[in-house]
Image: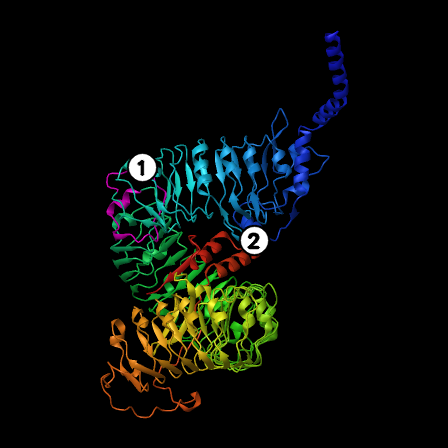
């Protein structure tokens, strides 16, 4: 009976299942693809939109990866095994491969995504899409059949799930983050120490591991798998001592560890066997604790060696010539001295050579490699003539010999240089244009002739139809800009620098093109009005018209003309009217410099929309307003210069919990503010409470310790407070003592009374202290003697009494530091503290308007001119984006990246000079 029940139960089950199996069989008969996988793919597709405008897509196209929306052709009635990017098993029909790289996908990958239903996947490539901050879910760890996983450069964010270490069959794992920021935000992928070590321990079959530009800021304690052939940890922040076993991995062919400044690298005791399999080695920008190894007796198969920016000293050994297969050698930005060895010049396969920014000497001799396309020897101490044979190298297209001691170069050397597409000459040697004014350069894309004593615009520019980069700065060009230059169509001009010449004339016909991203015409004698047509340059990123004679209002449209505008410097002109009120939300402005003009009216409240603003300089104008306490919401503001305007009234109360959190320099001197100096504001200067050396780049001229300094294109770590020449009353707030990092404190020419706070002794970094011209009373606190870095002190014109503190720097200050404090005594004053003679009557306090302070330091004189800028990543990305959109080739992108320090090697550029 039991057997009968079992039999009928099985029979009933068979019939109940039969229709579904028949449908499934029929589906498979028409389509190879398994129904469940097809459904999962279609549902996965529906979670994304298609966005072809992303920078990532352009990157794919221009680097040889065809970028197009693969999923748009996925149709439910078609066999999914024939869908673009899908690979199926020939027998089972299960999806085993999915390649949606460069597919314009935009959206989130959530843990409940149907992607994770594809349990038979062996290959998954989602690189170069925009997953707008999706997490790398633990569900990826359940796809245990995966052998190849590529999630690179797709805007993933947060911690990498530890479950990734469950993928024991993984052979290749790519997770670099080349684009940390996009229009939706900034994404930072990071590994936790335990998760990273678990991955290295469990993925024993891993051959290729690429995690570049992720965040892995810890010391590596686990050895790498011996099966590894490719390892890239570039720019990950790894630190500590590199485990020596990485150089002994028997199958390693590519080892990329560059851009990790806290990583200490020591090559093991020389054993030629460590180079047996290695083909590419990059240890650039690490702490390389050795000289260049002597490779004598080694037959090395290395193709690419990058030890740039490692502070390597000594000489380049002759044994470098044993690297006979070398195609790329980068030793730039080190301390290498001596001559360029003959053996290096004899490397016949060499294509790219970078020895820039070292201490190399003597003359350049002939290079034997006919394959050379790039030679960088700039910023050394090379001398003599430039060998003409360099210009006969058939593939040479990028040459930089600037900042050496060469004899000048003649333009006709380049007549037969048929690869010329980029030409840059820079230095003190003259560029001779007298013999070949009409040499045609139809393919010229970049031209740099900075500091070459040029006296006129080169005529051959008339024939240049493809120019994207033009630098004629710091020359001797006099007169007006030629009419032919202004009327020429510059459709793809991205970079124009005519600064530091002697140009005159009206600027109304300012060269403005739709493609322009960098426009610098500063430090000339141009006059007239800023044309409103400049607002039509929607890609404009940097605008510098400072140090001219412009006399006009600022066009209102400049406030919202370009979403990319980051730097606007119109300082030191004769601009009048009001500051534009049109700064729109979401703008990119970082530096706004309008100092030394005749601008009036209130400070526009729309500046609060500039959320990325780092520097605001409106000093020496006629701005009439209350103190702009509303700027407290700008969380990135580091430098605020309000000097010499008509700001008036009390400072007011803060409305946010953390006002001015990044402020390092504030100069609000020579205004008409009244009342007390608010402790609330001072107590929230968080950046000034930190003594770290985070830097920012500005060019500033200032007066410190009574001496004027010009700091142009330098890294500045100075923090400063200047509230001089106000009408502040009451006591100096004790809270100032909690600001540990200020190097300059200037509170002179106010009405401060009471004692000097002892808490000022806590300002350990203080170099300059000016409390002169107040009504301060009492003795000089002994705590000030502990200020080890104090070099300038001015306590004059107060009512201080008693003996002057002694010790350390105080013994070096002269009597000018204390004058007209009639009850002070002791060194360096003539009055001895034992003198009982009645002092003369105290002089009445003199108002600011009644004194002549020409002999005294009266605070900072800031002038943020932002010359040069360096442009950095900003211009590189903007130019890159433009080049992608206009179809320029890959080499030009590399030029821009090298020029602005993006750590990529350039192509197609020539740069000669001394």
Q: Residues within 10 Å of mark 1 (few under 14, many from 20)?
A: some
Q: Is residue 129 visible?
A: yes
Q: Position of residue 593 (x, y in %)?
A: 49, 73
Q: Residues within 10 Å of mark 2 (few under 14, many from 20)?
A: some
Position of the C terminus, as image quadrant, is bottom left
Q: Residue at x 39, y 45 (%)?
A: 257
Q: Nearer the viewer, residue 844 or 341?
A: 844
Residue occupying the far front of the picture: 836
Report if residue 797 lies within the magenta region. Answer: no
Q: Residue lying furthest bottom in this view?
A: 841
The magenta stretch is 295-323
Q: Nearer the viewer, residue 659 or 53?
A: 659
Q: What x and y, as percent, mark residue 892?
A: 48, 56
Q: Is residue 646 above or below residue 135?
A: below
Instruction: Pick the quarter of the image with the N terminus.
Output: top right
Which residue is denoted by mark 1 in the rendering? Answer: 274
Q: Image check: 738 left or right of 530?
A: left
- Judge from the rendering whether residue 694 lies leftward or rightward of residue 584; answer left or right: left
Residue 55, numbered circle: 2
Q: Main secondary structure of the magenta part?
A: loop
704 vs 532, left or right, is: left
Res 847 quadrant in image: bottom left
């Amino acid at each position: 009976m039991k057997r009968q029940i079992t039999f009928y139960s099985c029979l009933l089950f068979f019939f109940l299942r039969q229709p579904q199996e028949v449908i499934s069989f029929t589906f498979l008969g028409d389509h190879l693809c398994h129904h469940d996988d097809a459904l999962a793919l279609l549902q996965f597709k529906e979670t994304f939109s298609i966005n072809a405008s992303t920078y990532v897509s352009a990157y794919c196209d221009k680097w040889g990866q065809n970028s197009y929306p693969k999923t748009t052709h996925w149709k439910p009635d078609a066999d999914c095994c024939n869908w673009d990017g899908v690979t199926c098993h020939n027998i089972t029909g299960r999806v085993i491969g999915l390649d949606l790289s460069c597919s314009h996908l935009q959206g989130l990958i959530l843990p409940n995504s149907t992607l994770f239903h594809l349990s038979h996947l062996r290959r998954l490539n989602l690189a170069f899409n925009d997953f707008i901050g999706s997490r790398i879910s633990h569900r990826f760890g359940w796809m245990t059949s995966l052998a190849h996983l590529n999630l690179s450069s797709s805007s993933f964010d947060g911690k990498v799930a530890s479950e990734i270490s469950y993928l024991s069959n993984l052979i290749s794992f790519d997770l670099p983050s080349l684009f940390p920021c996009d229009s939706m935000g900034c994404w930072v992928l990071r590994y936790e120490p335990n998760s990273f070590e678990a991955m290295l321990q469990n993925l024993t079959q891993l051959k290729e591991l690429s995690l570049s530009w992720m965040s892995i800021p810890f010391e590596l304690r686990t050895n790498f798998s011996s099966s590894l052939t490719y390892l890239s940890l570039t720019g990950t922040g790894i630190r500590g001592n590199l485990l020596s076993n990485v150089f002994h991995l028997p199958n390693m062919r590519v080892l990329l560890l560059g851009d990790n400044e806290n990583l200490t690298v020591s090559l093991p005791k020389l054993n030629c066997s460590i180079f047996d399999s290695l083909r590419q080695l990059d240890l650039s920008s690490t702490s390389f604790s050795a000289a260049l190894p002597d490779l004598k007796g080694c037959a090395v198969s290395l193709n690419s060696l990058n030890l740039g920016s490692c502070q390597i000293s000594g000489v380049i050994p002759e044994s470098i010539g044993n690297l006979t297969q070398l195609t790329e050698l980068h030793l730039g930005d080190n301390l290498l001295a001596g001559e360029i060895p003959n053996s290096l010049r004899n490397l016949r396969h060499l294509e790219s050579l970078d020895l820039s920014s070292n201490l190399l000497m003597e003359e350049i001799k002939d290079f034997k490699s006919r394959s050379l396309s790039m030679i960088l020897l700039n910023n050394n101490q090379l001398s003599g003539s430039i060998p003409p044979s360099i210009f006969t190298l058939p593939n040479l297209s990028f040459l930089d010999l600037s900042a050496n001691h060469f004899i000048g170069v003649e333009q006709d050397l380049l007549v037969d240089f048929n690869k010329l597409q980029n030409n840059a000459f820079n230095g003190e040697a003259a560029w001779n244009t007298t013999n070949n004014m009409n040499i045609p350069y139809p393919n010229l894309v970049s031209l740099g002739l900075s500091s070459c004593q040029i006296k006129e615009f080169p005529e051959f520019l008339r024939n240049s139809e493809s120019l994207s980069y033009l630098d004629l700065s710091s020359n001797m060009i006099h007169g007006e800009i030629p009419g032919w230059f202004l009327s020429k169509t510059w459709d793809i001009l991205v970079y124009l620098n005519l600064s530091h010449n002697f140009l005159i004339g009206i600027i109304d016909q300012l060269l403005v093109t739709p493609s322009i991203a960098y426009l610098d015409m500063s430090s000339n004698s141009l006059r007239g009005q800023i044309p409103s047509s400049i607002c039509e340059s929607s890609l404009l990123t940097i605008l510098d018209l400072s140090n001219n004679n412009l006399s006009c209002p600022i066009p209102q449209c400049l406030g919202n003309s370009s979403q990319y505008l980051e730097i606007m410097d119109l300082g030191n002109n004769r601009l009048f009217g009001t500051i534009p009120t049109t700064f729109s939300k979401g703008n990119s402005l970082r530096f706004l410099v309008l100092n030394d003009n005749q601008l009036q009216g209130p400070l526009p409240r729309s500046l609060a929309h500039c959320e990325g603003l780092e520097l605001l300089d409106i000093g020496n104008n006629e701005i009439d307003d209350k103190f702009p306490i509303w700027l407290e919401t700008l969380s990135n503001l580091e430098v605020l210069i309000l000097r010499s305007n008509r700001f008036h009234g009390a400072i007011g109360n803060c409305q946010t919990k953390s006002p001015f959190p990044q402020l390092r320099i504030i100069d609000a001197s020579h205004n008409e503010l009244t009342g007390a100096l608010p402790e609330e504001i001072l107590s929230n200067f968080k950046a000034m409470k930190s003594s770290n050396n985070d830097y920012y780049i500005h060019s500033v001229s200032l007066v410190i310790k009574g001496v004027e300094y010009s700091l142009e294109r330098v890294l500045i770590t100075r923090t400063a407070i200047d509230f001089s020449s106000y009408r502040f009353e009451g006591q100096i707030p004790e809270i100032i003592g909690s600001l540990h990092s200020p190097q300059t404190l200037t509170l002179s020419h106010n009405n401060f009374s009471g004692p000097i706070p002892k808490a000022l002794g806590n300002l350990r970094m203080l170099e300059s202290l000016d409390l002169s011209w107040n009504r301060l009373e009492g003795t000089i606190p002994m705590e000030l003697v502990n200020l080890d870095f104090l070099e300038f002190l001015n306590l004059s014109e107060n009512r201080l009494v008693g003996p002057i503190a002694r010790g350390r720097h105080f013994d070096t200050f002269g009597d000018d530091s204390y004058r007209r404090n009639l009850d002070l005594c002791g060194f360096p004053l003539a009055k001895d503290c034992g003198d009982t003679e009645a002092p003369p009557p105290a002089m009445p306090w003199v108002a600011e308007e009644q004194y002549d302070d020409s002999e005294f330091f009266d605070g900072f004189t800031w002038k943020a001119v932002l010359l040069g800028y360096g442009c950095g990543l900003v211009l590189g990305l903007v130019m890159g984006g433009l080049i992608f959109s206009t179809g320029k080739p890959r080499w030009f992108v590399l030029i821009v990246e090298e020029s602005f320090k993006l750590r990529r090697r350039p192509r197609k550029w020539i740069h000669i000079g001394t």
